Image (spheres, helix red, strand yellow):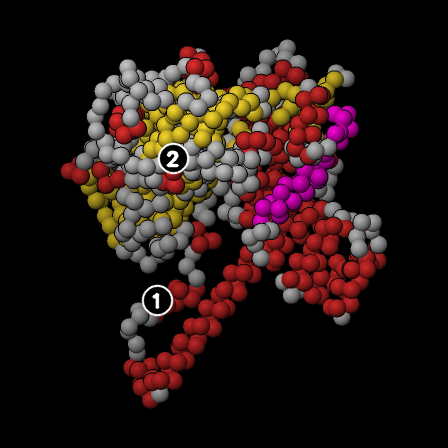
Amino acid sequence: MRFFRALIMIGLFISFEFIFAQDLPSSEALDAGNLAKQIRESIVVLTQFDRDDSEEGVGTGFVVSSDGLIVTSLHVIGEGRPVRIRLVNGEELEVKGVHAWDRTLDLAVLRVNKIGLKPLPIGDSSNLSQGTPIVAMGTPHGLDFSFVQGVLSARRTLESIELLQLALPIEPGNSGGPVLDLYGRVHGVITMKSLITDNLGFAVPSNFLIPLLDRPNPVPIERWMTIGQLNPKEWTTLYGGDWRRKGGGINVRDPGDSFGGRALCLSTLDVPDTSFELTVEVKLNDESGAAGLVWAADGGDKHYGFYPSAGQMRLTRFDGPDVFSWSILDQRITKYYLPGDWNVLKLRHDGSRFYCYVNSYLVFESGDRQLSGGQVGLVKFRNTVASFRNFQLGRTVKDKSDAIAPSLGQALIDESINIGDFTEPIITRASKVPNQALRHLSAEAERLGRQATQLRKAAKLLQRRLVSDQIVALFNKDEKEIDLFKACLLIAKIDNADIDIEYYQRQLKTMKNEIKEQFKPDDIASNKLKKILVYLFDENGFHGSRQDYYNKANSYMDRVLDDREGLPITLSVLVMELARRCGVDGVVGVGAPGHFLVKHLYDNQEQFIDPFSGGKLLSVPEVEELVRVNSGRNIGGDQLPVSTKREIVLRILRNLMGVAQSKDAPLDLLRYVDPMVSLKPDSAFDRWSRAVLLIQSRKFNAAKQDLEWLLQNKPEGIDLKRVLEVYQSLQ
């Protein structure tokens, strides 16, 4: 929808006091002041959060049913986005689901957990004539419940949709708000504003809203809010807490509803009957909070817990819902716990006693037998943000604490010198030259600090080089044997070293198994592919990232699986790789300009598929129109080439490069260009790009090697005179 992209979200203003008023619609036209007072309690403020839980934008909505239906624009809530709703009195409403929605009309109807709301009546928008006075209320630039007057200036058909053209002072934040006549009837839902003037906007006519309310397509919020949702087959959460999957690990932000802000996340894994081991790595962003392991959990209030809390380790037993049924079995400060860092917590249960370790060191041993059996999992208390990774359960589990054990230097400090305690020889020597001693220590600290910075940079560069080498190594085999899914995960690992590749490979295997369970013995290939598409886009909510298209997360395969949102190319890879693993042959990628597609070749036929649009099946004319819209080029469907896996990886790397080049330093951009050159050594464009970045990073010798390659091979399309000038300037 090109026109919609050329416009921005809107809002309206001017505040009035809240006063209860008569029901709408009024039998007589109201003056603006009275009308503002009457509609105020029917307006809501919606706050949308992005993929990293930061506030992304504010919009408006309005009540249309006393039992909890609220209308807004679809882009205000976003596909898969967390959203919060607030009434004029400050009360926040919990969203239970999306009652109805239509992407083409940019409309959404939310179901909230409250009855007794004051609805606005819906008018017949066809009766609203040009020049009719109208009003609106919304949240322009965060100014809640602001009011404005104007007129209907015209009706316009844009991309086959008739919209109301409004003559109103419009600002960002009012998208989703109502357009009303002076009787208090809703005639439209504000959807966008003009980039040319502030006093020009558009609204979707209310007559499009009525059939949406009459024939809803409800989606529970658990399915709608796809971003980072935990797999219910793997985890069960209790007492809130907002648990999210990220990078193969789990993050939890908000305090839980139980006492002390307790929130639980219990694993569905079967716990061995006798002895078992349980381990996880945990990191807190605020040491005043607490987070760690639980076991013997009854699915309610009872369980054991082992976790850091306020800087010390704690072993607890919870026997009920409140502070009076909580017992601290043991607690102590230990030098083996690393505040602000990743720490490995491990429980070993031998059936009669349990042993609790932090970073391989035993801190607690207990023979408490009050609780037994039950589930194991994770717990978080208070306001800290806690991150978990490498959760494992088994009769024995591999201890990964060596990677984060205290450094030798820190261990020596802990063992030999408590800060402030000095031996007499040290005091005597320092007292003779106190100023020099202090200056020496400060200078040494600065030197070590610079060295630490350099080591961190070196570690990052080494990590990126190793990942790049892994990507290239995947392509040292035949096309059919290349694991494209793993290659895409490794691309994401370039920017996030903590991604658990094995976790996402297991997740894809689980998805494959769930899909194959739906196959019937007589299913032909096209039917199997349709079931794959239904599984991804209808049952599990995968979708194209329309409002956040240029977010780098869309190119990271781990985030595509976590958030169920991505670019055409990453969603296409997911379709292709699931099809391959499910035994559906002939599912290939098509690198159409501006919009990647999937094509299924079967029985001398071909079927185009657009994963970005929910797995929509496309005819050849539709594909050609899609290419024309996105690239301005007229290309026949039969002229669109099948992309190799190497070409797909290169295209994803170039997408990331395109997003990063306006923000990142030249040295950092090399993390994308280096694997591009390694995968396609004869690419003159990539060679030249790398040479320029190397020069900008003052790595002149390395740059000369790429320039020499260009001068020796003389590729077409490169200004060799310019290359020679640059090369000679480096001599």
* Amino acid at dot 1: Glu
Please give the residue where the numbered disc 2 appears in the rendered image: 12
Q: Crowding near pointer 1: few (<14 within 10 Å), some, many (20+)? A: few
Q: Indicate the position of residue 174 as horizontal and vertical percent values.
A: 40, 33
Q: Can residue 24 be seen here?
A: yes
Q: Is residue 416 above or below residue 532?
A: below
Q: Which quarter of the figure has residue 348?
A: top left
Q: Give the label on residue 252, or none.
A: none
Q: Which residue is mark 1?
A: 415
Magenta-colored stretch includes residue 461: no
Horizontal and vertical percent for residue 20? Answer: 21, 26
Q: Which residues are magenta?
A: 634-660
**Label 1: element kind:** helix
* Residue at 30 percent of width and 20 percent of height: 29
Quarter of the N terminus within the rendering: top right
Q: Residue at coordinates 78% horizontally, 60% vertically from top-left?
A: 722
Let me know if residue 296 appears in the view.
no
From the viewer's perspective, is 101 left or right of 575?
left
Label 2: how many residues lie within 10 Å, few (<14), some (14-19) or many (20+)? Answer: many
Real-space CA distance between mark 1 and mark 2, rounded to the nearest whole angstrom: 64 Å
| Quarter-of-image position of residue 721 | bottom right
* 160, above or below 416, in the image: above
Q: Residue furthest left?
A: 324
Which secondary structure lies at badge 2?
loop
Q: Quick check: 87 above or below 155?
A: below
Left or right: residue 375 compared with residue 711: left
**Which SS does the magenta portion mostly show?**
helix
The x, y position of residue 514, in whole percent, is 53, 22
Which residue is painted at 43% across and 77% down in the image?
Answer: 443
Figure check: 377 above or below 699: above
Amino acid type of the residue that numbered disc 2 sits on in the rendered structure:
Leu
**Front-most of 9 and 682?**
9
